[in-house]
Amino acid sequence: MKTTLAALLLLCLTAVASAEETAVGFRSSTLPDAQNNRPLQMVVWYPAATAATPELIADNPVFVGALGVPDAAPAAGEHPLVVLSHGYGGNWGNQVWLASALARQGYIVAAVNHPGTTSKDRSPQAAAQLWQRPNDLSRAIDAVLAQPTHFGAVAKQRIAAVGHSLGGWTVMEIAGARFDPELFAQDCGIHPKLGGCIGYKQMNPAGTPAGKAKLAKDLSDKRVTAVVSLDLGLSRGFTDASLAALSVPALVIAGGVPTEDMSPALESADMVRRMPKASTQYVEIGDATHFSFMAICKPGGMALIEEDSPGDGMICRDGQGGRSREVIQQQVVALITAFLAGAKP
């Protein structure tokens, strides 16, 4: 317990020091749509021009938050943009560690809650509209581009998408990967215990002919110039042809601790094998689990989750005998920033 508390204290002190070096602003808003059927909660972290004392954002009894200055004025100049996509049943708070770290390095970072597949909204009807997820990210890009006085000006040739788990599937779709519902259904007959197959069955996005057709469409956004996938699922439904034809540089990071429902060999590594070698980077982190890419749990956080939802406390567990989650995440931040710097046009 003392070691964990010391690590968390060190993390907070590091965050404070970084915040003093580069101020980070934070804004939350709701993006309406024309039919008002799919409003999106969006949060944005961005380089700010402020000397105000930062506050902890998305900090709660279970998870460690990150520092930001609410509604601060944005810093001058153009900044690259990153849009973030959370996993199935998650929310934008899952990757605050990454969003705040990238903002401190000069990125504007926008994250949304995907309706139907977020902890804030588990509507079966919205969840079944899986094809909407890439469009959610496109709407976030539209919103940030349209409001430079709120978030800062965007360097339009440097727009990246980063996603975890189902969010990884989402960013691959926005990069140009195409999903074949029939191919995936056949594969799930062979690998029914994969988490992607279980979640897909719950969402049932191909339950109607219209849904199947929409899911198989080209869902890409040509403004996106690079993508990062963090331990994604559903990758076995991507067609070989679409993966081989990807023109967007991609960094694929996998948790190396295999489980029955998430195997890097069957997901991330299998997908990379079918992608262009020249523009694809693959890193498998041996002591990372699927949940190492989520927010850091506080001491006692696992017990609190178990009280509310027995069995879900595993999201606070990392690889046995491995490094702490905060150290793993420092490695991930370094990998992503190096990749995005190298992906400049």
Image (spheres, rainbow, N blue to C red):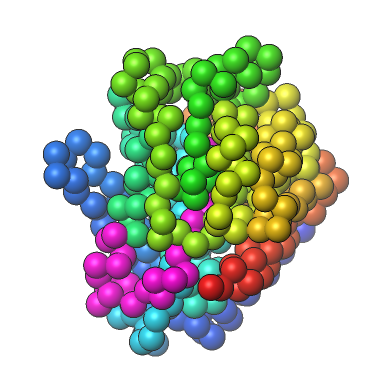
Q: Image height check: is 227 above or below 146?
A: above
Q: Position of residue 303 (x, y in %)?
A: 60, 36
Q: Is residue 335 left or right of residue 209?
A: right
Q: Nearer the viewer, residue 316 or 193?
A: 193
Q: How many marks?
A: 0
List x then y, in percent, for residue 2.
Answer: 75, 57
Residue at horizontal 24 percent and vertical 67 percent from the top: 146
The residue shown at (52%, 18%) is 182
Residue 273 location, x and y as percent?
73, 41
Image position of 38 with respect to 281: above or below = above
In this picture, residue 37 sits left or right of residue 334? left
Find out whether residue 296 is within the magenta segment.
no
Residue range highlighted in magenta: 142-166
Seen from the viewer's position, the closer of residues 163 and 5 is 163
Q: Residue at x 34, y 15 (%)?
A: 208
Of residues 332 and 160, the one nearer the viewer is 160
Q: Kindly identify the residue that appears in the image at 36 percent across and 87 percent down.
A: 76
Image position of 130 (left or right of 17): left
Q: Nearer the viewer, residue 100 or 258?
A: 258
* Image quadrant where residue 262 sits: top right
Task: From this view, report whether residue 182 is shown above or below residue 152.
Answer: above
Work out whether residue 207 can be spotted.
yes
Single out the residue that lies furthest toward the left: 35
Q: Is residue 160 magenta?
A: yes
Is 308 drawn above or below residue 293 in the view shown?
Answer: above
- Coordinates of residue 291 in the picture (x, y in percent): 64, 42
Quick check: can you spot residue 72?
Answer: no
